[in-house]
Image: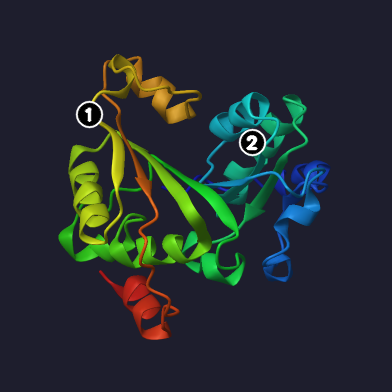
Amino acid sequence: MRLRRKPWIDEAIKEYSDFLHLESCESYKGKWRTLFKDPDAPLWVELGTGKGNFISQMAQIHKDVNFIGIEIQVGVLYYAGKKCAAAEVGNVQLLRFDVARLEDIFAPGEVDRFFINFCDPWPKKRHAKRRLTYRGFLDRYARLLKEGGQVYFKSDNAGLFDFTLEEFKACGWPLSEVTYDLHNSPILNEAMTEYEAKFSAKGQPIFHCVATRPQEVIDHVVKKDECRDEETAE
């Protein structure tokens, strides 16, 4: 759901321009690590960073990791920038970008880990290709992850979670840390999104899994026809 646009954010967001990118960032493809103090550190990417609670906490916990947060809505990205600045983390870059075009900004094997937290479930069957865990997206993640790279997934939607597990299995991704109640499991949950904190406090169980990049990676580039199908599906 898109938030109502707040005109004042267009100016206020410029305060974070040293680590927040609103314009085209294709030129950094294969070179993201050069923007960080430690270019040899692992690169972890959050797809749909929201208001930044998760990434700002993770960057504080893992100072030896470089983080990139991707969000399409400027009105949301502003608050992520604000939280990262308040946390005084120097290992975060934030991008305004469409995650459907990840291969335009990341090179094969450039990413060590992806986080997908509480993405839109797109519950209607005809919209399955829009889900961030649909096999077309999984193929892209596999190409961009290094060998042994992983996707960390969290959701509160049981239907999406079951769909996600089946897609990972069908695409040959080994699964671990699979749980239908993360907060009452022994699995480490280092940071929560704003959404997770709100709804888990109401008793909503959180579903979680970790998927490791398969040994065999589909190396073809997603064609325009496939992208068009995702954009025009109704």
Q: Earlier in the sequence, mark 1 or mark 2?
A: 2
Q: Is residue 198 above or below residue 145?
A: above
Residue labelled with disc 2? 79
Residue 47 seen by the camera: no
Relative placement, left or right, of 100 versus 136 is: right
Secondary element under disc 2, as helix, strand or loop, is: helix
Left or right: 2 with respect to 225? right
Q: Position of residue 210 (x, y in %)?
A: 36, 40
Answer with the quarter of the image where residue 156 lies: top left
Tell me residue 11's x, y (percent). Answer: 78, 47
Question: Circle 1: is it few (<14), some (14-19), or many (20+) Cα within 10 Å?
Answer: some
Q: Quadrant of residue 125?
A: bottom left
Residue 180 tag number: 1
Please tell me which residue lies in front, 160 or 28: 28
| Residue type beneath disc 1 | Tyr
The quadrant in which residue 103 appears is bottom right
Q: Nearer the viewer, residue 47 or 32?
A: 32
Residue in view at x 55 percent, y 50 percent: 112
